[in-house]
Image (cartoon, grey):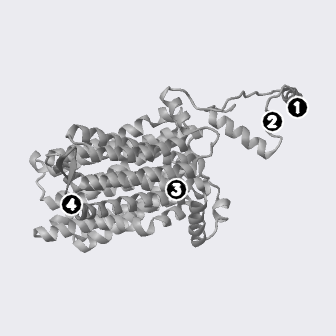
Amino acid sequence: MLAIRPFRRLWAVTAVASFGDWLSLLALTALATQLTSGYQAQSFALGGVVATKLLPALFMAPLGGVLADKFDRRTVMVTCDVLKALLFLSIPLVGSLWWLFAATFLIELCALCWIPAKDSSVPNLLKRKDQIETANQLSLVMTYGVAVISAAGAFALISKAGNLGIWRPTPTETVYFALCVNGFAALLTAFTVAFRIPEISGRSAERRQAAPGLLAMLRDGAHFVSTTPLVRGLVLGIIGAFAAGGAVIASARLYAASLGGGDAAYSTLFIAMFAGIALGMAFVPRVARRMPHHRLFGVAIVGAGTSLLLVAVAWHLYLALLSVMLVGLFAGTALLTGLTIIGAQVEDAVRGRVVAFVQSIVRVDLLASMSVVPLLVGLVQSRTLTLFGQPAQVDGTRFVLAGAGVVAAAVGVLAYRQMDDRRDRTILADVKRALRRRRHGEPGLLVAVEGASRTDTAEQSDRLVRWLADQGADVVLAGRSASHGARVSAAVGASGVAGQRA
């Protein structure tokens, strides 16, 4: 994958941008507490930064997808990077809390436009559709793995710079320095996209100019999502998967206490969740070779809900860690599979809007889950149940997690029914084939006919088709009609055949 020069450069841009995003989160939250005094004021300031980063995604995320589909994606990315750089560099110059909130809001608006433009351009940089999954895998590992660790390490190093004796900054100056690093990183990505990856533009100027207005594109995108069974099922499944993940994150502290653990158990549960997500994204390509993506997606959502039921009944920390890791594994599988489906099966003209819509759904779902679950736990409270004739104290988190698991599993079934187009084969057959490490595919034989001229080739192909039909075979001749061509394309795609000759 990294041998493809445009994708390699975009992947490097993703690495720098993701590093900057995580570093900015640490720096902005730290600065918010330093610009205020008093525990209550600092708590409100910290919550204000988080809320300000989420607000644009809740209300304006589809706009970023419309811009990615309407305008040149390279121009959108460069403009957003330059604006982000100026905003990051302005925060130390102004040095006030109100501008911190305003700049954070504007930076997130730029990110909302930048991310759909970047994600929707990835398939155009690849040579084959079967490379999309690996490309998404590399991007997600960088964004939620390497970049997180690198940003945390860099922020810790910058914070301890005074101990080296070279420079003795105040805590506020340290955060300002981190924000300046972010600003120059954004300028670097803008330069790279503008001058080193012209392939991101992808579409012709005539095609972009022929696109409808922004409001019409926004309306068309919403109509496409609501009327396309594949995308509708994808959205339903993502709601279920991230509702399950958000329930675990929101109740992790109280859940750890119910297991007799403290802060160490709480942090270990977080590590188990993200380790499971990483494992899910790492092993998806292997499983996808043996099961169609839309079926793998449905299985992953149901698996996340079922694993959440195991989390609810776990009575020991080790069992809880294993169950939480399973939730993360299935959630990571669903995320990577969903992005692959969008890249491979959603046409380029609406891909940006679909990507933006899915991203907004993820954020809204996580925020809603993390807000509602603690309230439900407080309402349910601890209950005393009689099990096998003995009274048992059951924490309220167990009931809420069990309910979330049932909802996630039910949503997974609905998503699968929306997306499934292979009613002639049961999903259990595909699961068995995947467990036995057999590739999925349709039975049949692909025959390529070559001749000295197009006329000779067509004549020999017709003779071969008639002879095979006389033998009782179901024959499809590519090029005879649009429906036959679609059947051949579907058969080749299902068999995993790839390459120029395929």
Q: Identify the residue at image location x=82%, y=44%.
A: 481
Front-most of residues 110 and 495: 495
Using the image, tell me which numbered label, if any, was put on residue 462.
1
Amino acid type, mark 3:
Arg
How far is disc 2 from disc 1 in space, using C-alphas? 8 Å
Residue for point 35% across, 54% down: 404
What residue type is disc 2 on? Leu
Q: Can you tell which of label 3 and label 4 is closer to the viewer? A: 4
| Above or below 359: residue 337 | above
Location of residue 225 in the rendering, given as x and y in whole percent from the top left corner: 56, 60
Crowding at label 2, few (<14), some or many (≥20) Cα neighbours within 10 Å?
A: some
**Which amino acid type is marked by label 4?**
Gln
Residue 235, above or below 445: below
Neighbourhood count class around disc 1 (C-alpha, 10 Å): few under 14, some 14–19, many 20 upward: some
The amino acid beneath tag 1 is: Asp
User: Relative to 477, is 398 on the left or the right?
Assistant: left
Asked where in the image residue 100 lies, by quadrant, the reply is bottom left
Whether 208 is drawn above or below 466: the answer is below
Residues under numbered marks 2 and 1 in contact, where contact means CB atoms less than 8 Å apart: yes
Q: Which residue is mark 3?
A: 74
Mark on residue 381?
Answer: 4
Q: Is residue 457 visible?
A: yes
Q: Secondary structure at mark 1?
A: helix
Give the secondary structure at mark 2: loop
- Mark 2 = which residue? 477
